[in-house]
Amino acid sequence: LVVALTRAMKNELMDLGIPEGRIHVAPDAVDWETFDISHSQQEARDELGLPQERKIAAYVGKFQTNGEEKGIPEIVQAAGILQKTQSELDFYFIGGPTSCVARYKKIAAKYGVEKSRLIFLGKQPIKQVPLWLKASDVLLMPFPKTDHYEKYMSPLKMFEYMSAGKPIVASKLPTIEEVLEDRKTAHLVEPGDAGDIARAVSEVINGRQDAERMSTAAKAKGRKYSWANRVRHIMDHYRSIE
């Protein structure tokens, strides 16, 4: 049995001559015991020392993968668009490496983004990550359109975001669409399009009831993506091979 993260990887393995029945697609998952916390948004913000009156859009995770950007430049541009209509909205970036931040701040200056709207934090203890997710109003992962992101990734942050029961804005890419569905479990936007990111974030902030419906659906769907279930499905497929 060969285990692949995505359907695109499965197709490439079949092109190499591996029989379809010996390939099992198993995306990544999340540790529900760690991430499914009972904190309300208010409680999470109190514990992290965050203001209750502000809206928070958050990106949580590594800022780059193998030297490739993961959408932060476009989020910064989107912040510049949104500051005209969403005066109460701040953008938090939790992760690293912090060596990237100077470049992101240059992008912010280029697009006239107010410095106070962008908060860059380094890596946080894993036990605090679920608090950051709960404290947010919308979670962002607008990956660019590259071979890696289109075909080969199964982002841990996607499943962590789903476990938080918060609205998600993500790129419309095949690897994302294997798990999330536009307007049902997330807002999917065009990769690399800061305007589309801004539109989706604004819709989440302004359309509370619809956002809650999608985030509830995402969390319900996400429950099947546990590490225990992943192992179980892999072993079931392995045992089924004659």
Image (spheres, rainbow, N blue to C red):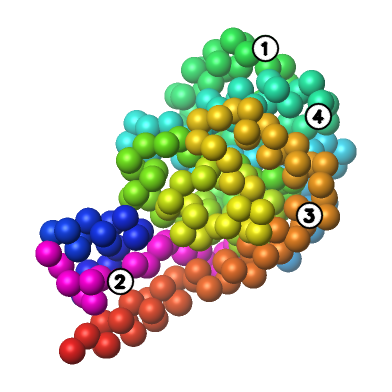
For marks 1 and 2, the one nearer the N-term is 2
Residue at the image position 55 percent from the left and 57 percent from the top:
180
Mark 1 to mark 4: distance in Å? 15 Å
Residue 133 x/y as whole percent: 65, 50
Establish if 29 lies above or below 235.
above
From the top left corner, tell me how far across and down residue 75 is, in percent.
59, 30
The residue that label 4 is drawn on is: 86
| Residues at marks 1 and 3, CA–CA distance in whole angstroms | 31 Å
Q: Label 1: state its secondary structure.
A: loop
Q: Are marks 3 and 4 in contact (CB under 8 Å)?
A: no
Few, some or many residues within 10 Å of mark 2 (<14, 14–19, 20+): many
Do residues under tags 1 and 4 come within 8 Å of each other at their CB atoms? Answer: no
- Residue at the limit of the structure toward the right, as seen here: 53
Quarter holding the N terminus? bottom left
Q: From the image, tell me which residue sits under label 3.
A: 210
Q: Give the residue at x 37% y 67%.
A: 26
Q: Does the magenta portion include 34?
A: yes
Q: Which residue is mark 2?
A: 24
Earlier residue among tags 4 and 2: 2
Q: Residue 135: give x, y in percent of width and height.
A: 73, 48
Q: Hey, what amino acid is under mark 4?
A: Gln
Q: Secondary structure at mark 3?
A: helix
Q: Is residue 176 above or below residue 108?
A: below
Q: Which mark is residue 134?
A: none
Closer to viewer: mark 1 or mark 2: 2
Gap in Å between the C-alphas at discs 3 and 4?
18 Å
Q: Amino acid at mark 2?
A: His
Residue range (magenta)? 17-36
Q: Residue at x 64, y 40 (%)?
A: 58
Q: CA distance from mark 3 to mark 2?
A: 35 Å
